[in-house]
Image: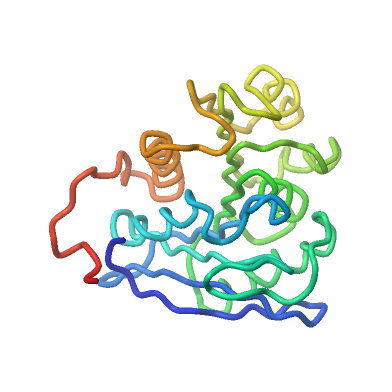
Amino acid sequence: MLVADREDVELVTADGLVLVGEVALPRDAPPVATLVCLHPLPTHGGFMDSHVLRKAAARLPALARIAVLRFNTRGTSSPRGTSEGEFDGAVAERYDVAAALALVAERGLPAPWLLGWSFGTELALKYGVATPIEGAILLSPPLHSTSEAELAAWHGSGKRLVVLVPELDDYLRPPEAATRFAVVPEARLVPVAGAKHLWVGENQVRRVLDEVAGTVAPGSAPLPTEVPDELVEAG
């Protein structure tokens, strides 16, 4: 855990729910970009502390001056708490995405990007294209509930789309991903050799965070693998 200004936040959705989350900001300089993290499937253990997202919040504010917003979608629990409501299979969760982006706008956080992982990629693809974001970074997109029309809406939108596809993914592997994402020819597909859906292990996490940082804060990647003691959070 590296130094950052961390604040527990609550997001209020248009349908009246309170979602719990956290914002992590660079401590000694304003952020250059913002990540809004959309976690994996809550019915299969996904939440705001899913390890890649937790490590993004732990490292990127200090190493790349990136603000990181993580939150539990409706009905999801973590040590931070439980968000109100019930899981709705990527339908009512559109209000959750909107509430997160509303907080980003309210706080004046710059250059927002959606960072979706697995189920979170469905939310990013379905509901991100019509929002004021720079783009979306997708980790292990299954493309289970995103329609071809929803995917094709990104073509010509002016919003960037970066797609990290594990070579050994359980749902969508690089050859099929190339076919499915062909409707968005400007999308950048990044096949990751040896990776699996859950990005287990420090090498895979570092690979993801380098790609994220290099995309949203050009010049910040590769991230350092050693840091001075003063960047390590006390306690």
Image position, residue 50 (x, y; %): 53, 54
Q: Is residue 115 left or right of residue 155?
A: left
Name the residue at the top extreme. 175
Q: Is residue 91 left or right of residue 228?
A: right
Is residue 23 depicted above or below 175 in this figure?
Answer: below
Q: Residue at x 68, y 72 (%)?
A: 99
Please tell me in which quadrant of the rendered image residue 2 appears. Answer: bottom left
Q: Quadrant of the N terminus?
A: bottom left
Q: Is residue 59 left or right of residue 8?
A: left
Image position, residue 151 (x, y; %): 77, 39
Q: Residue at x 67, y 37 (%)?
A: 141
Front one among 123 and 199: 199
Image position, residue 211 (x, y; %): 43, 39
Front one among 92 and 213: 92
Q: Residue at x 65, y 23 (%)?
A: 173
Image position, residue 55 (x, y; %): 41, 54
Q: Residue at x 73, y 54 (%)?
A: 43
